[in-house]
Image: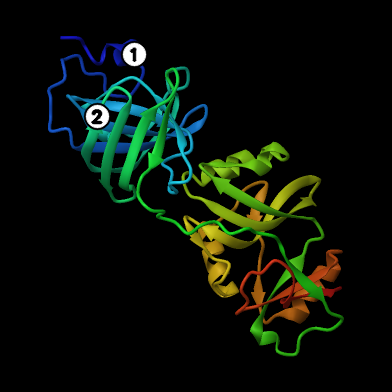
Amino acid sequence: MADKLAKYRSKRDASRTPEPVPQQHPEQGDDRAFVIQEHHARSLHWDLRLERDGVLVSWAVPKGLPADPKVNHLAVHTEDHPMEYLDFHGEIPSGEYGAGSMTIWDTGTYDTEKWSEREVKVVLHGERAQGRYVLFRTDGKNWMIHRMDPPAVDPLPPLEPMLPVKRAKLPRDQEAYAFEFAWGGRRVLVHVDGGRTDLAREFPWLRPMAEAFGSRSAVLDGEIVELGGAEILVCTDLLYDDGHALVARPFTERRAALDALDISGARWQTAPSWPAQAQPIRQAAREQGLPGIVGKRLDSPYEPGPSKWWAFIPT
């Protein structure tokens, strides 16, 4: 009988990596277990592993499992892994194959609907990954993964920045607003999906921030501003979060969800927001040479273009 783990062993030195490198021939189990590992290697990806005939048949999925049946994701078929990999997590040393941090993203059981050399249909029963998926082989060695269930997420609506309307005076009902600095930078909507953002093509320094999101999808509203001689992203609103559209929800809910993400780094941060404190915030903006402040009604939805819900008050 062929050694299904020969290729796996050939790529690893048991004295140098904490990964399991069993020498014995694998024993067949019940073909029900699966694990998905988040792998911060040279390029962030997720490893889907399905128990089959005593080994874990594996695919590397660069953008994670697709949540929407309209979108297929690349799945790179890799070498079979030992069953001990079901609960492996840790740091694979630099210089070793697959070097980087690996954590368990989800684990559970699965049902097999079809298994052939070109097509694998399964139903996943995990805490985070649930539903029917098919892995199918395309031309050559490439594979794709497709979700067969109805969408498990809200569709991403067309989005344009919401803009404040200029006012000469502060609103009378200041307790109904939260006030923020108007930074005077370039307004951007940051789409993050699969640990990546298209905005990194223009601003490569955003790649680590996007990678920190892991498999979480999000759309951030913010500004690219220059502070201390460096460009940074200042995040001011959250429009889409982990499969849920937030644009119809009040600003207070969106802001709480944004704060919960704890976006903070050397070149990205969450903008401060102060409810009902217009006068001191306006004075602070004036002292810092900022163009003004923005008042956002606490009950405001997010709508494209100029909106009466938001007010720009110059300093």
Residue mark closest to the camera, 2 vs 1: 2
In the image, which disc is placed on residue 139? none
Q: How is the image coloured?
A: rainbow
In the image, which disc is placed on residue 115? 2
- In percent of width and height, residue 315 lies at 86, 73
Q: Amino acid at mark 2?
A: Trp
Q: Which residue corresponds to mark 1?
A: 13
Residue 134 visible in the displayed image: yes
- In percent of width and height, residue 96 lies at 43, 18
- In percent of width and height, residue 199 lies at 67, 43
User: In the image, 101: left or right of 27?
Assistant: right
- Residue 312 higher or lower than 43, as above or below: below
Residue at left offset 21%, top offset 27%: 52
Q: CA distance from mark 2 to mark 1?
A: 32 Å
User: In the image, 164: left or right of 106?
Assistant: right
Q: Please, what secondary structure does the residue beneath circle 2 have?
A: strand
Q: Amino acid at mark 1?
A: Asp
- Residue 24 higher or lower than 83, as above or below: above
Residue at left offset 65%, top offset 46%: 266
- In percent of width and height, residue 311 lies at 76, 76
Q: Please, what secondary structure does the residue beneath circle 1 have?
A: loop
Sequence-wise, the earlier of marks 2 and 1 is: 1
The N terminus sits in image quarter: top left
User: In the image, 306: left or right of 259?
Assistant: right
